[in-house]
Amino acid sequence: MRPIIEFCTNNMHHGTDKLMKKLEANPDYDVIEYGCLGNCGECYMFPYALVNGEIVAAATAEELEKQVEHKIKEIEAMFDLLGE
C-alpha cells in the first residue's frame, strides 16, 4: 500500500514545503501538491496535509511530519489486520 500524501500550495507558508520535498524523496509515498484542497480554515490556521484523504494537522511543520508518519503506520497496521 502506497500512501497518498496531499499538500495545499496555500499552506506552504507554514513550512510544509520542506516536509513535502522530504516526503517526495521517499519512493514508497505518492506525494501530490494541489493549488487548493478546499480546507481553507484548516489551511489558514495550521500546517496540514491529507493522508489517504484524511486531514492530518499539527501546530508546527515538524510536528506535522510526526503526525503524518504516525497516520501512515496506523493505516499500514489496519491493512495488516485485514490481511491485504
Image (tube, helix red, strand yellow):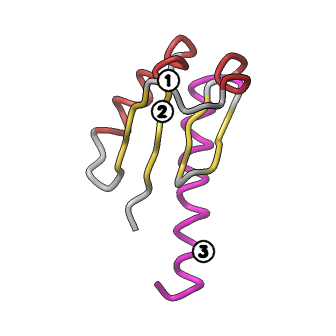
The percent coordinates of residue 56 (x first, y second) are: 64, 41
> For the view shown, which residue lies furthest in the top direction?
13
Q: Quadrant of residue 28?
A: bottom left
User: For the magenta stretch, what is the residue range?
Assistant: 59-84
Q: Quadrant of residue 24?
A: top left
Type of amino acid under label 3: Met
Tell me the CA gap for discs 2 and 3: 23 Å
Tell me the CA gap for discs 1 and 2: 8 Å
**Which residue is rendered at x = 41% and y = 22% of the image?**
18
Mark closer to the chain start, 3 or 1: 1
- Tag 1's secondary structure? helix
- Tag 2's secondary structure? strand
Instruction: List the residue tagged with mark 3.
Output: 78
- Badge 1 vs badge 2, beta-carbon distance below 8 Å: yes
- Nearer to the camera, 33 or 78: 33
Type of amino acid under label 2: Phe
Q: Is residue 80 above or below residue 9?
A: below
**Which residue is rendered at x = 43% and y = 51% of the image?**
4
**Which residue is rendered at x = 40% and y = 68% of the image?**
1
Mark closer to the chain start, 2 or 3: 2
Residue 16's disc is 1
Residue 7's disc is 2
- Tag 3's secondary structure? helix
Q: Is residue 18 left or right of residue 52?
A: left
Q: Is residue 32 above or below residue 70?
A: above
Residue 72 drawn in magenta = yes
